[in-house]
Image: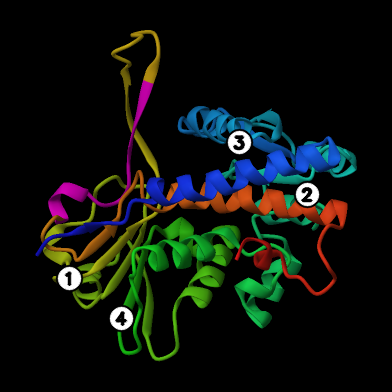
Amino acid sequence: MKTKILNGTEYQQGIFNEIKTKIQEFNKKYNEVPGIAFIACVGHLPLMKYTIPLHENAAKQLGFKVKVETLPHTVDQEVFFALVEKLNMDKEIHAIVLLQPVPKHINALDVIEKINRDKEIEGFHPQNVIDTLIKGVFKTKYPMCLPVSLIELFKHFNVQIKAGQDLVFVADQDFITDPFRSLILRTSSSQVIPEGCAFSIINSDNKKIRDYCKKADFLFVLSEKPEFLSPEWLKPGVCIVDIYSNLVNEIPSKKDPNVLIPIIRGGVNTKSIMNIAGSIAPCPGGLMPVLMAVLLRNACTAFEFSHSIKSDNTKPHEIYA
């Protein structure tokens, strides 16, 4: 069995091309481009020093006006609130993104709730989550990035979830118990899974994890334990989505030894599951590139809202349908 690689980088480029063209059109019409602000804490997670420039550079290359606000990992939550309020009032900023994860003492949901809903483009604002659960992901102000990315990636590669299939989310304890992470996980899964499918969320430390994985037709992995999943646990033909990025090493660049290159791994060793799994969205290179593209597409939608260039009957997602 040949395993299909669901290459998100390939799909990302198509969305990026659309965004770049759109921003050029904005600039011609309004003499203005979308402004996006990234808020991040530094010092608590080594990967963040790569996450910040990754988002910043991608947005700049597409033509966004970019502002990066970094805070120490010891920051008080009230300082977060003050920064968010400042960005809410900034007329040149149309989209605000809180880069995750934040330090443990910061309540991400409280911070996101402070973001002006018109500028909160990830779809995490409480009102957007409520709308997503009631109306569906494509009838909200900004479609939540994670489920939309999954839906679009699967559609691009003609991967279909069918009634009667088993879907298993394997996640670390923190993804299950942390209010913010759990909210995203459960809301996203509710939008991706069709009726008639069995669905389970399993702790990655569960002693019966092999039994759950063995029955999975679709296996979604969110773990801070790099490459922990054993290929012996897999049902032949399973579709795997490896979601969470872990920094496992940093090596000097061949071009410039003073520049370090991050080595990223998910919870699955991609090589080990080849010819067992039917398909895999690997980490890196699978779902994450699509997530970034959908995020920046939502930022364009925020700019369009701010200029009222859509009719009252147009939904945000229809602009890019």
Q: Residues within 10 Å of mark 3 (few under 14, many from 20)?
A: some
Lower position in the chain sequence, tag 2 or tag 4: 4
Q: Which mark is residue 237?
A: 1
Q: Could you tell me the amino acid type at mark 2?
A: Phe
- Indicate the quadrant containing the N terminus: top left, top right, bottom left or bottom right: bottom left
Q: Nearer the viewer, mark 1 or mark 4?
A: 1
Q: Earlier in the sequence, mark 1 or mark 4?
A: 4
- In the picture shown, does residue 69 fall above or below 98? above
For the residues labelled 1 and 4, say whether their Cβ atoms are less than 8 Å apart.
no
Viewer-nearest residue: 126 or 152 = 152
Amino acid type indicated by mark 1: Gly
Counting residues from the start of the chain, the first of labels 1 and 2 encountered is 1
The span from disc 1 to disc 2 (Cα, nearest Å) is 42 Å
Tag 1 near tag 2, CB within 8 Å: no
Residue 31 sits above or below residue 291 on the image:
above
Residue at mark 3: 62
Q: Which residue is mark 4?
A: 166
- SS type, badge 1: loop
Q: Residues in magenta? A: 261-273
> x, y (%) of residue 260?
38, 18
In this view, the mark in front (4 or 3): 3
What distance separates the C-alpha of mark 1 from that of mark 4?
12 Å
Frontmost residue, 178 versus 12 = 12
Q: Mark 3 belongs to which amino acid?
A: Leu
> Sequence order check: which comes first, mark 1 or mark 3?
3
Label annotation for residue 303: 2
Q: Which residue is at a point 56% across and 32% down the rendered structure image?
A: 52
Residue 288 in percent (x, y) is at 44, 49
Q: Secondary structure at mark 3?
A: helix
